[in-house]
Amino acid sequence: MNTLATLTPRLTVLAALVERHPELPAPAVDICGIFTEQINLTFYDAPDAFHQWLTALDIDRATVRGRAGTKDAWLTVLHEVDGITLKLTSCTRLATTVETGGEG
């Protein structure tokens, strides 16, 4: 069973990241009870923010994995900080264009 105490290592890493990089854009943060050594950081429609984090944490871009669907594109990378895995994810809606022939 997880307790509040199991959050301590992850919250410590998150606080250290805030202290070291206060200028970074804030992602959506998920601290899951299942993956007790992981923090999920998600950037919705903010690919530039995702790339700023990659640069700040000196993450090799070759380790980023991506996939695209018909409406969304996803980039994901895992990076370890002080024994905690950061899962950074960028989710961006793809632009869609409908041709109407000039009539709406």
Image (spheres, grey):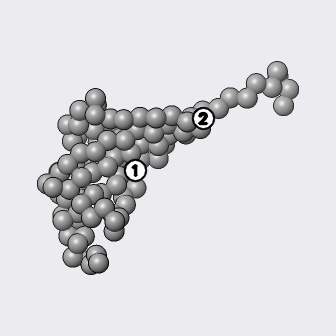
Quarter of the view holding residue 29? bottom left
Q: Position of residue 98 (x, y in %)?
A: 73, 29
Residue behind mark 2? 70
The one nearer the camera, 91 or 101, is: 91
Locate the N terminus and report the quarter of the image it occupies. bottom left
- The relative height of residue 27 versus residue 31 in the rendered view (above or below) is above
Report the amino acid beneath label 1: Thr
Identity of the residue drawn at 25% across and 70% down: 7
Identity of the residue drawn at 31% across and 61% down: 35
Q: How many marks?
A: 2
Left or right: where 104 falls relative to 89: right
Which residue, as the protein is rendered here, is positioned at the far left? Answer: 82
Locate the C terminus and report the quarter of the image it occupies. top right
Report the amino acid beneath label 2: Thr
Quarter of the view holding residue 37? bottom left
- The relative height of residue 5 versus residue 58 in the rendered view (above or below) is below
Query: Which mark identifies residue 42?
Result: 1
The one nearer the camera, 21 or 85, is: 85
Left or right: where 33 falls relative to 91: left
Identity of the residue drawn at 20% across and 48% down: 80
Q: Is residue 73 visible?
A: yes
Q: Position of residue 72 (x, y in %)?
A: 54, 39
- Dot 1 lies on which element? strand
Q: Position of residue 22 (x, y in %)?
A: 24, 51
Q: Position of residue 71 (x, y in %)?
A: 59, 38
